[in-house]
Amino acid sequence: MIPILLTVHCQETLQQHFHRRGQAAPFRGATRYLENFSAVWQIQDYLVGEAQRCGVPVIPNTNLDDTLRRVFGVITERLLESF
């Protein structure tokens, strides 16, 4: 297992993600996340701090291509360290 934390660094962007996900998959309860957004944001801040403390890569989920490139880069790096 290779731990990686994906984050969204802009509150407005994260809210937009929840809105779009709610439209694409209504059963996932986007309203619940939006109603509790400040708690979601605090949890992300906590998780980022813990990831940094533990040496887990934190990758901003800004654009699919860039995010995937960075995720695959971390995976490749870790695999090369193992072999």
Image (cartoon, rainbow, N blue to C red):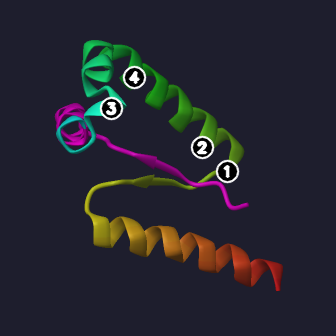
Start-end of magenta stretch: 1-21
Question: Is the residue 34 above or below the residue 3 in the image?
Answer: above
Q: Nearer the viewer, residue 36 or 79?
A: 36
Q: Dot 2, how many residues are within 10 Å of its Cα: few (below 14), some (14-19), or many (20+)?
A: few
Q: Which-is-in-front pick, marks 2 and 4?
A: 4
Amino acid type, mark 3 = Phe
Q: Which-is-in-front pick, marks 3 and 2?
A: 3
Give the spatial CA distance, label 3 vs label 2: 33 Å
Q: Is residue 45 left or right of residue 51?
A: left
Asked if the residue at tag 4 contacts the one at tag 2, i.e. Cβ–Cβ closer than 8 Å, the answer is: no
Question: Is the residue 48 above or below the residue 32 in the image?
Answer: below
Secondary structure under badge 2? helix
Expressed as whole percent of the image width and height from the top left, the position of residue 50 reads: 62, 34
| The label number, if any, that marks residue 52 in the structure image | 2
Give the spatial CA distance, label 2 vs label 4: 18 Å
Amino acid type, mark 1 = Gly
The residue that appears at 81% across and 78% down in the rendered structure is 82
| The label number, if any, that marks residue 27 in the structure image | 3
Asked if the residue at tag 1 contacts the one at tag 2, i.e. Cβ–Cβ closer than 8 Å, the answer is: yes
Amino acid type, mark 2 = Gln
